[in-house]
Amino acid sequence: MDIRMIHGVPHMECRYLGGGKVLQLTDAGTDRRFGFRTMNASIYWGKENRVQEIEPQMEKHRMGEFYFAEHERNYTYFFHLEAIEGAADRMECVLYRYLLEEQKMEELLRFTDRPSLYQKDKQLKVFVLNANYILLQFAYRRSTLDNTHEGYYDFEQVLYDLDEKLKYQVTEENISAYGIETIFPLERNLCAVRVGYSQMEGGFSSFTKGDAPVELLGIIPITQMISELILSQSQLSMEVICSVQFYETIYGLSMTGDHLIFSRVFRENEGRELVNYNWKTKEIQRYPYKKSAGEELPGTGCLIQGRPYLVNGDSSHAHLVPLDKRNGEIRFQNRSRLAGIAGNLLCIENMRKKMFTGRQETVYEVYQYPEMKQLLRERGAGLCWLEAPDLNIVYMFLCNEEE
């Protein structure tokens, strides 16, 4: 896998859009009218090595998180908020789609809301199911039944048909009660859906049997999911990979190639196992592991060249624990963390002091697995590490030393 370095960029978030296109988002301050952060957006065209800003005259608000059921596409989405005359705590929320090839912004839908709710009591997730259907999920803050913990545990979802200008209230019993946590695109018209929030968020002791969520991880065709939501079926008829409640919880879901990787954490003795599920072959592998001393949250699982590792949650140094006895552990020096994995490449962020000035600096090192041969070492104030699997490239956007 090739590494392509781009130096001197600002601190930013990145999302790979396929075909060498990268969405870049940089912070643009707070809109004092509504209290939301705003952002600047641009597209990095990797094949031409150029950056194109997206509609710089339009204010773009960080109102919600976006999730995509299809693999990356030739468009992206933004919220723009408008004041409503004579209404102090009301705003018009407009969702736009930007078409990359046409370089055109189009309005998709709009609704009104109260900005004050989003300071503490409300959150928004946007699930883009395909080019024609978008699901908005609003989560509301409440306490657990015994008042030991607060979280976003009440949900409302609306499915929008953009072509027909129709909307449907979602009534599927698990989604409406426990929410969609995330969606992963698998292949054309197929996605993985995780329903229900993890009990690790507040700890097992925060949930009773009465308010512990149903947690589901399954696979479903996108068009089937849309049809069943429109028809108000009581439950999605998806291929269930994992279903737990109260006695177990799902934690740390991620995807590497054809593999879905997550931890199952058990209430009794907080036992743990890493699950590696190949969604193409249906093969499942389980690797039990123990809770580390003083550990509050489980480590996150990963695959490196098909070999399972647990990324230790200890923040003092990067430490990858092998879950297959054939593999050796990977340990780095203090004040380091794992910044990214792509294929057989590991990127490690190290915090060091300069020899003469004593000033702290950040150094990024890339190693080749399994030899752990160092391929490069670069200084920077931040990093956006992004894999482009269709091009067999890793983009390393290294931020400026000074903002």
Image: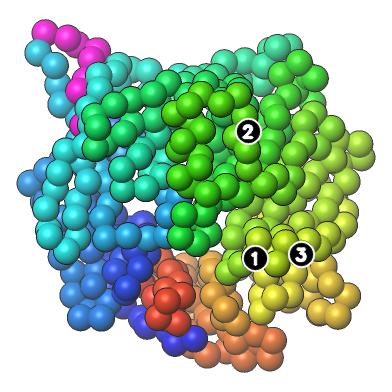
- Image mark for residue 283: 3
Where residue 8 sits: x, y (%)?
27, 73
- Quadrant (top left/top right/bottom left/bottom right) for the C terminus: bottom left
Q: Amino acid at mark 3?
A: Glu
Residue hosting label 1: 280
Find the magenta span and give its range.
86-94
Name the side, left or right, on which 24 lies relative to 141: left
Q: Residues within 10 Å of mark 2 (few under 14, many from 20)?
A: many
Residue 30 in view in this figure: no
The residue lying furthest to the top in this view is 86
Q: Residues within 10 Å of mark 3 (few under 14, many from 20)?
A: few
Residue 47 in view in this figure: yes
Residue hosting label 2: 196
Residue shown at the point (26%, 55%) measured from the top left: 75
- Dot 1 falls on a residue whose secondary structure is loop
The colouring scheme, among rainbow, by chain, secondary structure or one colour, is rainbow
Counting the numbered discs, the total is 3
Residue shown at the point (37%, 60%) measured from the top left: 72
